[in-house]
Image (tube, grey):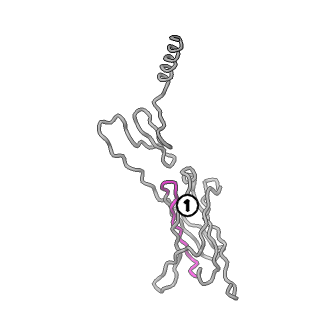
Amino acid sequence: MSAIKLTCLAAIALALGSCTSDIQIGENTFVHKDKIYKIIDNELREIGDLSAKEIKRFEVSKPKQKDLGSSSLSFVKSGASTSLKALYRGNYLYYTLTLAGINDLRDSYNAGTLTIEFIDEYGFIMHSTQIPTGELIGMLGEDGKYSGFVYHGKTEMSTEINAAIKSYDVTASIKRKSYFGY
């Protein structure tokens, strides 16, 4: 019986002695040598120090706005384009899509859909989201007519997909109304 106890005690001592100081304490959060680290947007960030005598206030990571540029919609109307700005926060990509050059969207086009395709550096579509044209908000010019349209949206995506996004493209199912009104 004492041999079993001695063997168990030796196994416990060996297990404790071979442990490293890395302990995972949450999703993407771990302790290494008395420092607490978290992986945020594929970047390792120190968020705490367990050996500090005073509690330091660590800055919360401030998300950075991405300007993904513009995309042509000349296949819908000559000179039409979109621009997209995005901000990733808490597994959601918040974005603002601005549509220019189709000021007569409500009067001359049937209801349709815009599809935003988020693209990686190799040209693969990593994520897409659809916007019905009826949900676009018209921006009025000084003359009281539409000068463009804007859409503020959000879509759920992982940090890995967000980090891979380098550009975007917009496809559309918008058709000009016929002379007969449909």
Give yes or no for residue 75 being in the magenta stretch: no
Residue found 61% across the figure and 58% down from its top:
127
In the drawing, does residue 45 fall left or right of residue 182? left
* Location of residue 83 (image quadrant): bottom right
Q: Amino acid at mark 1?
A: Thr
Q: Closest to the observer: 87 or 26?
A: 26
Quadrant in which the C terminus is drawn: bottom right
Q: Position of residue 90 (x, y in %)?
A: 48, 54
Residue 40 vs 3, above or below: the answer is below
Q: Position of residue 88 (x, y in %)?
A: 50, 56
* Location of residue 63 (image quadrant): bottom left
Q: What is the tally of numbered marks visible in this picture?
A: 1
Per the picture, the main secondary structure of the magenta-coloured stretch is: strand
Give yes or no for residue 93 being in the magenta stretch: yes
Secondary structure type for disc 1: strand
> Which span is picked out in magenta?
88-104
Judging by the rendered image, the residue that carries numbered circle 1 is 155
Residue found 50% across the figure and 61% down from its top:
94
Q: Closest to the observer: 30 or 69?
A: 30
Q: Position of residue 135 (x, y in %)?
A: 56, 73
